[in-house]
Image (cartoon, rainbow, N blue to C red):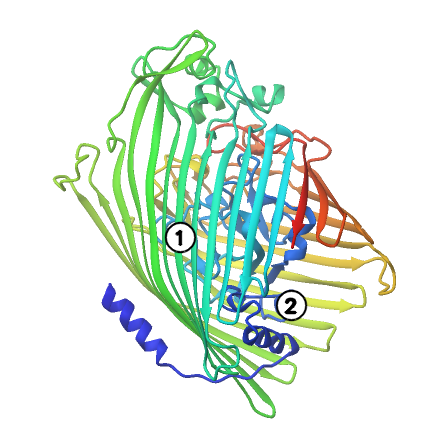
Amino acid sequence: MKTIFSFIFLTFSLTTFSQTTENVEDVALNDSVRKLDGVTLFGDAVVGSKFRAKNVAGSTYFISPEELKLFHYNDINRILRTVPGVNIVEEEGFGLRPSIGLRGTSPSRSSKITLMEDGILIAPAPYSAPAAYYFPTVNRIQSFEILKGGSQIQYGPNTTGGAINMVSNQIPSQFSGRVVASMGNYDTRNTYVNLGDNFNNFGYLVEYNNRNSDGFKTIDFSNKNTGFDGNDYVGKFRINTNADAKIFQSLTLKAQLSDESSNETYLGLTDADFDSNPYRRYLGSEADNIQTNHKQIMLTHLLIPSDNFTLTTKVYNTTFSRNWYKLDNVRINGTNYALSDILEDPVTNQIAYDAITGTTDSPDNALRVKANNRSYGSKGIQTIANLKFASEKFKHDLDFGVRYHEDYEDRFQWVDGYAIQNKALFRTSAGTPGTDANRILEAQAVAAHVLYNFTYNKLVLSPGLRYENILSTSLNYGNADVERTGANLVEINNRVDVFIPGMGALYKFNDNYTAFTSLHKGFSPPGAVEGADVENSINYEAGFRFTKKALSGEIIGFYNDFSNLQGADTNASGGTGTGDLFNAGKAEVNGVEVLVSYNILNNENSKLKLPITATYTFTNTELKSNFASGTEAWGDIEVGDEIPYIPKNQFAIVAGLEYQKFTISLSGKYTDEFRTVAGQGPIPANELIKSNFIVDASAKYYLTEKVSLMTNMVNILDKEYAVSRVPSGLRPGMPFGINFGITAQF
């Protein structure tokens, strides 16, 4: 591995390119780099601004720092709720482990999209086990970049739905700091502090964030809270040459550490119990808790030998460990009862239902609580070079990158026995680590991409090509070999070698109207599963952007034609939890995305502003093959069935009122009903999540230029609504919540 790392680094460090700026924003960005203001941002962002997002031959959405400060959300689900083309399934109400899909891809644990932080893959094991049980604390993220269609061909391994890059807070241009403190109902508290400075040849930023809450659910017969407590620490340190050096260089070290303890469960409610009290939890889930620990070291080298060349190299190493200790099933009189079966039909499974609710005393070891103990690692090196040059009529922008990456998931799990006696839950037996799951998944991947933007007058052509070479390995030691001697080792290897082409075109009629289209191949790796094929699709999109005085927007149509769609057997999607992928066959996903913004009071001299933004997403899905998936969420598939957990219609609106020192914002999101099991026609009641319309609000008052008071309210109408039926039973969305806080900066 060291030889490969050295070869890649040497090859691209000796490469020489040249570039020229092509618009005002590019000039400003290069100037800021030379002035050491936002130098790290140059290498961490993949879009960088709303201006660039609107001038890409593909669907691109940029959430700016100003927008993030509008509502002061701590929940990524609410941050993304107004972005067209995004599908979200809530889980615990706080956005700790989000499930995000783009353009009809399965949202389960965000495993079908490419998640990045500062341009680096951030899922615990993005190739071998991409389910995002870790997600960055959003308070330390200054902007979000969402790429779909042809604009995301540079980023993988998943290229079907899209990619999300989170740009972390940057080293400031001068000595400054910021403190945000808030508290609200359910004993919810948030504290964020940062401090940084910038000198001629050195800059730094240190951050601390604590989030905690007692939760909004109540466990039967118990005073244990259902909340969480998490800490996040970040340090960034940069050294660099003088700003006017002939060859500018900087080296930035980013170190991050976070931990979390969350009393969260996979156990939901029956329909009848949900209707009676959606915020109830059964006593059988009292011991449920997840402990996590995340560490990352990243080193970024930026080289600017001339005004028309940049070379950014990142070396990274990430580790993540988690043990989600949660009720897994019930065993009484030698019969196993799955939690989903119990909650689906509590009458037929009355004896098991009584056991998890504590209605009657249960035998020893009746409640089986699994320690889903897993550790992950991800490391690699990537280099991205950019070349820009221009002639009298033509402009050329060439982006070339290569990455070597390794990751793994280590499952070492066991099951403890519990019982409920006299309305109290207690452990009756301790399992042996490794006797439930005892295997390692590994992946090694070499990826490369080239993207060429060619501009002639008003036309921009953007051909691109991505290459992925992946070796996936499964080492299953078996439940009897907890020492991992290899006596019963089952090894499976799977190699994938694939080229992923894409093509985009953009035409600017004038400064107000732009049309674009793109075509690219969708791809997701198959993992180390015998018989599983890669996910393949051909994805098309066409869009139109417009700006007319105070009115702006875009409308995009997309069509994804799958020759093979992948499903995954995960607990989060109602499966057995093996994590194995399976072939779902042919499928089609198509839809429309609309965004419109309008400033009602479009007067530069007016002290009053009233901006409004509305978004709409229509998504249609259809499976084109017959097969038996073997998992609850997919079931037995017939041609014409819809993909579960994808609502057909979503609508969001954000309105703001700004007057001198005071701002008020209102946000509403409508989510159409959707099915929880693949099917067609009217949705059966036991497979239905009803539609909902949830309204949030925020307000801010500036005491001084540097100090402001703020409040934000979620679900201000206090709607009781369901968000999911997986993993087991109905789960509620966040009830009414209110937070008050203060922000101070210097």
Q: Amino acid at mark 2?
A: Lys
Q: Which residue is mark 2?
A: 54
Q: Which residue is mark 1?
A: 296
**The furthest residue to the left:** 487
For marks 2 and 1, the one nearer the N-term is 2
The picture places residue 39, in percent across and down from the top left corner, at 53, 69
Q: Quadrant of the N terminus?
A: bottom left
Residue drawn 43% across the image and 12% down it:
424
Residue 300: image quadrant is bottom left
Q: On the rendered structure, is 374 left or right of 743?
A: left
* Vertical comparison of 225 with 578: above or below: above
The picture places residue 185, in percent across and down from the top left corner, at 64, 30
Element type at mark 2: loop
Q: On the rendered structure, is 156 left or right of 411?
A: right
**Given this view, does label 2 or label 1 mark the residue nearer the observer?**
1
* Vertical comparison of 607 with 483: above or below: below
Q: Amino acid at mark 1?
A: Gln
Dot 1 crowding, Cα within 10 Å, few <14, some 14–19, many 20+: some
The picture places residue 486, in percent across and down from the top left corner, at 14, 42
* Vertical comparison of 631 with 567: above or below: above
- Front position in the image: 82 or 609: 609
**The furthest residue to the bottom:** 392
Q: On the rendered structure, is 273 left or right of 432?
A: right
Q: Quadrant of the C terminus?
A: bottom right
